[in-house]
Image (cartoon, rainbow, N blue to C red):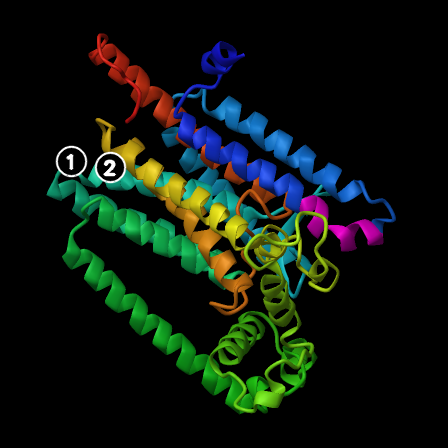
Amino acid sequence: MNSLLKKYLKGDIVLWTVFIGLCLISVVEMYSASSTLAFKAMNHTAPILRHVVFLGLGAFLAFLVHLIPYKFYRMMAYVLLVVSVFTLVLVLAMGVDANDATRWLSIGGFQFQPSELGKLSLIIVAADQIARMKISEANEKKYFPILIVSTLVICGLILPENFSTAFILFGVVFLMMIIGSVSWKRLLRLSGSLVAALVLLIVVMEFTISAQGPDPAAATVPTEENALVKKTGGILNRYSTWRNRVIRFTSEEDDPSQKYVINDENLQVQHGRIAIARGGLMGVFPGNSIQRDFLPQAYSDFIYAIIVEEMGLAGGVFVILLYMILLFRAGRIATKSATVFPAIVMIGLSLMIVTQAFVSMSVATSLGPVTGQPLPLISRGGTAILITSIYFGIMFGITRQIKEETDKNEPETDSTVP
């Protein structure tokens, strides 16, 4: 059996272990956290079967992708980038609305999130541009504007309906440029320009809100019930939502009697806190969660709270360690690459997964304002699971090729990545 796995599962065993570990945790916790979905479907097996199917498809995709030479990723990324731009524009024009945001596109009865495709294509394109910039100063001057335009287009199209994803994606690309030793002068100019643009956008939005009516953040009713949100559309609605979330997060109630009051605005946050408090050190064990029946997004954005409730602090820390091992292992492997492109791809993909994971976990533990970030490979999803599996497949493929190159160059030594 061991020789069979070694024959077909190439690449780094540690990354494969992390991938399989996250999938197993996902199956166990999704079976418990999807109780409300099972109740609505009147079939207790339907939600978990759907999830297992997507995880199985994801594992199959990861296996197929890890057999493809990484030079093909480089070529296909630009095609995917064009497709991403097209589908992201379609989402803004005719997307499917769910959970107060339009992030899904429905084609032939199949719904998917174009932003996931945009993230994958942009990270690989960014790695290619950074690799080209490393060749010479002239190349950096040539390709830096191309990279910035590509990043701003993708992030700009994602931003209106998914601020947190756009912010995380831009941050990952920016870190890739820092790690790729892009000129600090160019990065500082870029940072200054974006800060100025952000300040200008906030000023314009605040002026528009004040000109159209009462401040929605000051209302005691949920944002979606506010008259301003009903009579305005587009980015202003989303800005009001982001604004209210930040204000609610930063302005804790001074009155102790209100600290534990649960209302429509803090429903998820409060039940997430209760779930974590119930978990203790070892948890109540899988299947015994109570808060899964009260958290609207127990199977998605707040699944980490259910993990801590059922598996305790020990289980929560274990999940964190899996993501940290992924990040450090990817960085270690990147240092073994003889060329820049695969190294930057490894860093970019691992940063995207881990950053999203920590944002999701910070929301579930009340360390950050509520966003729509699922826990990678654990939360319920379709497109997200498949694309994240492709991330892993690409990383497996890169480690496989690095190992093969090392075997070829040093045939008499242990060629595994240390």
Residue 194 lies left or right of residue 321; in this view the side is: left
Residue 229 magenta-drawn?
no
Bin the neighbour count of mark 2 within 10 Å (Cα to Cα): few under 14, some 14-19, many 20 and up. many
Query: On the rendered image, what quadrant is the N terminus found in?
Result: top right
Give the overall secondary structure of the magenta segment: helix
The residue range painted magenta reads: 30-40
Amino acid type at circle 2 is Ala
Give residue 199's mark. none
User: Can you say whether 275 is above or below 153 in the image?
Assistant: below
Q: Position of residue 237 (x, y in %)?
A: 58, 74
Quarter of the C terminus within the rendering: top left
Q: Mark 2 near mark 1, Cβ–Cβ under 8 Å? A: yes
Q: Circle 1 sits in a helix, a strand or a loop, which is it? A: loop
Dot 2 corresponds to which residue? 131
Report if residue 188 is visible in the image. Answer: yes
Asked whether, in this view, residue 185 is left or right of residue 109, the answer is: left
Foreground residue, 295 or 190? 295
Q: Is residue 377 above or below residue 245?
A: above
